[in-house]
Amino acid sequence: MEAASVLVVGSGGREHALCLALNESRRVSALHCVPGNAGTALLATNHDVGVTESELMPLIASLSIDLVVVGPEAPLCAGLADACAAANIPCFGPVAALAHLEGSKLHAKETMQAAGVPTADYVRLDASSDVEAALDAYAGKPWVVKRDVLAGGKGVVVTSDREEAKAFIHSSVATDGFVLLEAFLPGEEASMLVVMDGTAFRTLPASQDHKRAYDGDEGPNTGGMGAYCPAPVVSQAVHARIVERIVEPMHRHLASQPVPYRGVLFIGLMIDDNDDPFVVEFNVRFGDPECQVTLPLLKTDVFSLLYGAATDELHTVELNVSDETAVTVVLASEGYPASPFKGRRLDGLEACIARSKYGIAWVNFAGVGLADDGEYIATGGRVLSTTAQGANLQFARANAYEMMDQISLQGGHFRTDIGHRALP
């Protein structure tokens, strides 16, 4: 399809990254975003409507959309892809039954067990469970407690404090009915994005996110303070094991369903000291900020990749990837991740936008809006990221930080050590 009209659903850094990549495609003639942000507004037409089926489907019909690309998980779990399928509109994102892989941690664990995919042992705890005995069984390493709901990245506690673990278990059982207690997986984390449909899968280069708020992996967990791609921890040998032990069995399972999985499967990985990969979690959408550093490295037309998956034609799409490196550094508001301050002005941002060049150094908008006077202001916890691409990690990293240094936000903070695990 040429001259395609594409709608991207979502409002964060991931959706701006998708719009930037789709904007590079010669096959895309019109780009729309719901609800979008100040960054997507520079590339696409933003529409101020909700992301529910009842609000989106009339808009999709009126705009004659050829491809819907769903960024966040909630609309997928609510059945947006099902509604698109009923209207014969290609949608990049799985139907609700398969989005349950992210919507329910228990379902994901049961699916991995059925498919023979390596993951951490776990126990399901409810009001009748002996919590003390369960904590004893997993003692000696940090306890990992996971809620079985969509919690916006805040449904997991990893702690060596028994009382904290116990309190989170009891509060989760009280609100959700049950909770999962998992064995702790030691090793180094990495992420892999796998685009798949009923016919094929394509593995994108592995990346590494930085979840803790502060340098040295200190402070509270966040939605992600930066990332780089590719991640050296995923060597060719490790990549082969991931494909053989995780990707292939999951694709066989997901492609065999009544409606096959059409979208991207985010695989959160732990690589142990023996270079063996284990699944920490599945997400049914592009990660944020992994999306910001993965898509720019694709030489393959991104629209062709996404449309191919949405129409079960992925087997016809050849994936080509640059041998360069991309780095993104997140600027967060004061108080993030607990209670971020909003409404503060972003000085220097306009000058950075003027000198941004996709594929070299540019700004990814997330929680950025416009004040009444037209000035850019912070509207969220993770405000934006500066992203750069180059021949190696050191070069890309230096350019990303050079651009970040040009932006000022009162009380804002960012990590200064993105990519440190891959540096000498």
Image (tube, rainbow, N blue to C red):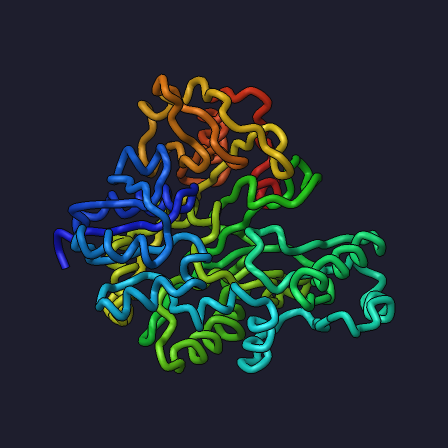
Give the residue displayed 56% in from the left and 20% down from the top. Answer: 410
Front in this rendered view, residue 168 or 329: 168
Front in this rendered view, residue 213 or 76: 76
Residue 103: x and y in percent read 52, 64
In-image side of 337 versus 158 (left or right): left
Q: Quadrant of residue 148?
A: bottom right
Residue 14: x and y in percent read 41, 46
Give the residue displayed 59% in from the left and 67% down from the top. Answer: 105
Tell me, yes or no, if residue 183 can be seen here.
yes
Q: Which quadrant is home to the C terminus?
A: top right
Q: Is residue 380 above or below residue 255?
A: above
Q: In this view, does 265 lie above or below 246?
A: above
Give the residue displayed 25% in from the left and 40% down from the top. Answer: 44
Give the residue displayed 32% in from the left and 61% down from the top. Answer: 92
Give the farthest residue toward the front: 54
Residue 59: x and y in percent read 24, 51
Q: In which quarter of the image is residue 172?
A: bottom right
